[in-house]
Image (spheres, rainbow, N blue to C red):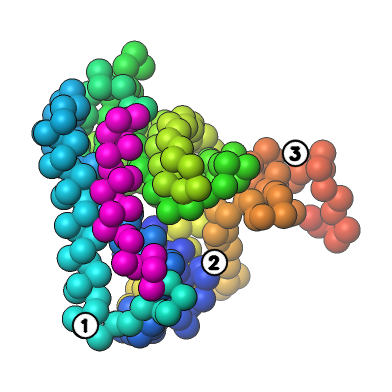
Amino acid sequence: MRIYSPSQTMDFFSCPAEWRLSRAGWQAKMFGRKELASILGDAFHLAHAEYYRNGAPAVTPQILTDLSFLARSKAEDSLATLERQGFECWDNDRDLRNALPLKAQTLVTRWLQENKVPREWKTVAVEHMLKDFGWCKLDLLVRPYPMERLAVLDAKVKLRLEKKEVAKELEKYAYSWQFMHYAWAAAQHYEEPVTDYFVMLVVLEPGFHIQLEHYTVNPELMLLWEQSAKSAWAVMAAMDGDPTDLQDMTDTLPGENPRPLYPWHNWEFFTRFGRREFADAFLRHRCHSHLMVESYINTKEGGLSENK
């Protein structure tokens, strides 16, 4: 089975045609706030990885200086590379572009001063790239004290997030495609269950905020996610010119009824307006029709077949 990264899969869910253009190497010439926020995140993650590769030592003034300037240099280099390649910043975002290296430096300084990850947690791996499981890169694999179970920890950087939006931002990570993929990939690679993951949310503006949130992975939801993933990846591979996985999933023996492809879900259960209509079908009832009647009314004869 060909496996695609979380970012590739989510791009495919957003628009398969745009995903194909991106796969072919096309990028918009103009860049702005979205791309600048990504550069800020990359600069932060470079310093974050360096800190944990060095054993997460007690923070000294020298460490503050070294890692904050590392992030600043990374932001400067990324901007220079973009512009050398011919990309141009929108005029409305020019001030942000010019201020970004200093913002990266400030972000790393504040994170090091207020890091919420306990230093007694055992670090198993730093930026481990799981090539065989969709080229997904795990910020940290840890064994949090006192539970000692293998867990994924991911840092999420926000250039700007209002305080009233923090709870919603953290809620959407509870069942995100990315973290289901990370937990699945880590469990496959390390051959042990991964039922926990942590998100460290780091917000720069309008006021610095850092929060460490713990999530658990439900095994039955993981099975539903894996079914969705295999269907989506098979279609993506077919669009990339290799229909083998799709054929294997839908082929039948002579005389048998056609085997339908399992319908995938993009694992986005929350919008800015609240929970999506069928969120409870997955999160509470696991798509079992005898449980779904608690929250839904079936208006068609036959209903939804049981999830196997």
* Distance between mark 1 and mark 3 Cα atoms: 55 Å
**Label pair 1/3, CB-CB below 8 angstroms:** no
Query: Dot 2: within a 10 Å radius of its alpha carbon, few (fewer than 14), some, or many (20 or more) residues?
Result: some
* Distance between mark 3 and mark 2 Cα atoms: 23 Å
Disc on the earlier residue, 3 or 2: 2
Q: Main secondary structure of the magenta part?
A: helix
Q: Residue at 43%, 53% (x, y): give it.
A: 159
54 relative position to 95: left or right:
left
**Label pair 3/2, CB-CB below 8 angstroms:** no
Q: Amino acid at mark 1?
A: Gln
Disc on the earlier residue, 2 or 1: 1
Q: Percent from the top left, x then y, of residue 244?
A: 35, 73
Question: Dividing the picture into quarters, in which one does residue 144 lie?
Answer: top left
Q: Residue at 69%, 40% (x, y): give it.
A: 285
Which quadrant: the N terminus?
Answer: bottom left
> Pointer 1: what residue?
85
Q: Which mark is residue 291?
A: 3
**Label pair 2/1, CB-CB below 8 angstroms:** no
Q: Percent from the top left, x then y, of residue 92?
A: 46, 75
State the count of labels.
Answer: 3
Disc on the earlier residue, 1 or 3: 1
Q: Amino acid at mark 3?
A: Leu
Choose between 186 and 298: the one closer to the eye.
Answer: 186
Q: Please tell me whether residue 52 is drawn above or below residue 250 in the rendered image.
A: above
Question: Dividing the picture into quarters, in which one does residue 9 lie?
Answer: bottom left
277 relative position to 31: left or right:
right
Q: Which residues are magenta?
A: 94-115
SS assignment at label 2: loop
4 relative position to 56: left or right:
right
Q: Residue at 21%, 54% (x, y): give it.
A: 72
Q: Please tell me whether residue 201 is drawn above or below residue 135 in the rendered image.
A: above
Residue 107 belongs to magenta span = yes
